[in-house]
Structure formats: C-alpha cells, structure tokens
Image (cartoon, rainbow, N blue to C red):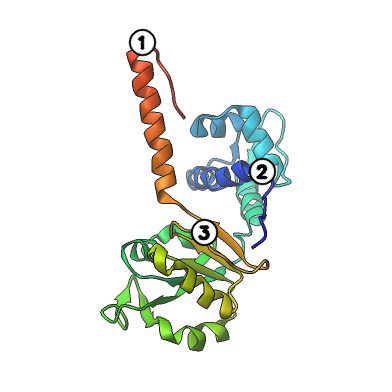
C-alpha cells in the first residue's frame, strides 16, 4: 500500500469527540455552541477548535457560535458518516466480540454485517446478534455483498492471511486491530489501531506527573 498521508490527521482524530459532545448538547436542547465550550471540554485552546472546525466548511456566527444541529451535520458529512458503511469482521475472539457489542458504531454510520472465524466452537453461534460464519465461506458470503470495509481482530500471526483473504474478495479498506504491519496492494487503505500505543502514551504521562510531583510542580499532562 502506498504511504497515504492524511492532511490534518490530528484534527480528524478530534472530530468524533467534538461530535459526541455536540450530540449531547443537542439532546439537551442547546441550539448554539461556542468554540469556548468545546475548547473547555477538550482541554484545548479556542483557536485550535476554530481551526479544526474550519475544515468542515461551516462558519460560526460572531458572538453566538455555531448552530448545534448544523455543526453536527457538517462534521458527519466531512467524515462521511452521513452514509452507512457495511463492514465485515474477521476474528470473533475477545476483542472482536467487544467490538460487535459496541453500540456506538451505528452512530458513526458503521454497521458490521458479516463476522468470520476459524474456531469451530464459535462457528454457527451468535454474538451480539451476529451469526459467526466459517472463514472458509468468506468468498461465498462476502463477494455478493460488494463490501468495501473489513475489520481484522485476529492474533498477529494470522493478520496477513486474513488481509489477503479480504483483499481477494474485494475489500478496499482494512481496519486492522492486530499489532502488525500489513502488506496490501496500493489501492487498499489500511488503518492500524495499536492498543498498546495508547497505553504507552499513558505510561509516559504517569511518569511525567510523578516526576513533576517529586519536583514540587503542578502539571496538567493532557
């Protein structure tokens, strides 16, 4: 796969958190929201929030802010979450099962419709309303659906074979939860989620806080 560089990647990563807060405010009947409110919630400077929201193409009203419903719609459109992404998942173990149980995906326009596994103890069972299919049936079940998105939740040793199967059956985007770099064709996009990476950052923050405490400093490590 070509090394795809997404402009403003940190901004894009913040968008779901903005959206979550905006949906909450909208449900409370708040018609307008300011960058100050979002900045305080995100622990950011207001100018950062303003620049983040600019990429959606929406403009706020001076002294008032943004219409909450319009900003929600603008963020969803920018992220492509105003459409439904049908996805398949390979690997119905602990992590895969947890993802199947996560109800928030529907709000992002993601629907996991097919689940595959090689464990005969899981095949034919149902997890969070989805039937677990034999991975050997992936061509039979996946190709007619014309799905574009596949999720990989298998041990690292099996991630590349799983990716090869997905690509061979028409998948053009892979959300990879295995801690391994996948080799795929240039026309296939991959996003790898390394859970240990998040914990690594948290560990460093803990060390920074402990060091600051020893030195008598007060520090907010965001």
Whether residue 88 appears in this view of the structure is no
Whether residue 66 appears in this view of the structure is yes
Residue neighbourhood size for the residue with mark 3, other residues' Cα within 10 Å, grouped as few (<14), some (14–19), many (≥20): few
Mark 3 to mark 2 CA distance (whole Å): 22 Å
- Please provide percent x and percent y for residue 196: 40, 47
Q: Is residue 160 depicted above or below 221 in this figure?
A: below
Q: For the residues carrying marks 3 and 2, which lies nearer the camera in this image? A: 3
Near-viewer residue (111 or 133): 133
Q: Quadrant of residue 158?
A: bottom left
Mark 2 to mark 1 CA distance (whole Å): 36 Å
Q: For the residues carrying marks 3 and 1, which lies nearer the camera in this image? A: 3
- Is 120 displayed left or right of 71 in the figure? left
- Please provide percent x and percent y for residue 111: 49, 68
Numbered disc 3: secondary structure: loop
Residue neighbourhood size for the residue with mark 1, other residues' Cα within 10 Å, grouped as few (<14), some (14–19), many (≥20): few
Q: Cβ–Cβ below 8 Å for labels 3 and 2?
A: no
Marked residue nearer the N-terminal end (2 or 1)? 2
Residue neighbourhood size for the residue with mark 2, other residues' Cα within 10 Å, grouped as few (<14), some (14–19), many (≥20): few
Residue 8 numbered tag: 2
Q: Name the residue under label 1.
A: 216
Q: Quadrant of residue 179?
A: bottom left
Q: Name the residue under label 3.
A: 181
Numbered disc 2: secondary structure: loop
């Amino acid at each position: 796969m070509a090394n795809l560089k997404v402009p403003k990647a940190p901004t894009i990563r913040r968008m779901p958190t903005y959206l979550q807060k905006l949906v909450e405010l909208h449900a409370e009947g708040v018609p307008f929201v300011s960058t100050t409110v979002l900045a305080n919630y995100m622990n950011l400077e207001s100018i950062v929030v303003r620049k983040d929201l600019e990429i959606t193409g929406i403009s706020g009203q001076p002294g008032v802010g943004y219409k909450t419903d319009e900003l929600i719609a603008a963020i969803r459109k920018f992220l492509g979450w105003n459409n439904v992404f049908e996805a398949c998942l390979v690997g119905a173990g602990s992590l895969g099962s947890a993802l199947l149980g996560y109800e928030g995906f529907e709000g992002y326009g993601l629907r996991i419709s097919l689940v595959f596994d090689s464990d005969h103890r899981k095949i034919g069972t149902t997890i969070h309303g989805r039937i677990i299919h034999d991975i050997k049936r992936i061509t039979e079940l996946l190709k007619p659906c014309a799905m574009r998105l596949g999720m990989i939740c298998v041990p690292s040793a099996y991630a590349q074979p799983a990716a090869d199967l997905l690509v061979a059956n028409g998948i053009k985007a892979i959300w990879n939860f295995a801690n391994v770099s996948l080799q795929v064709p240039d026309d296939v996009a991959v996003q790898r989620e390394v859970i240990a990476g998040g914990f690594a950052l948290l560990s460093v923050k803990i060390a920074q806080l402990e060091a600051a405490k020893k030195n008598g400093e007060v520090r907010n490590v965001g």
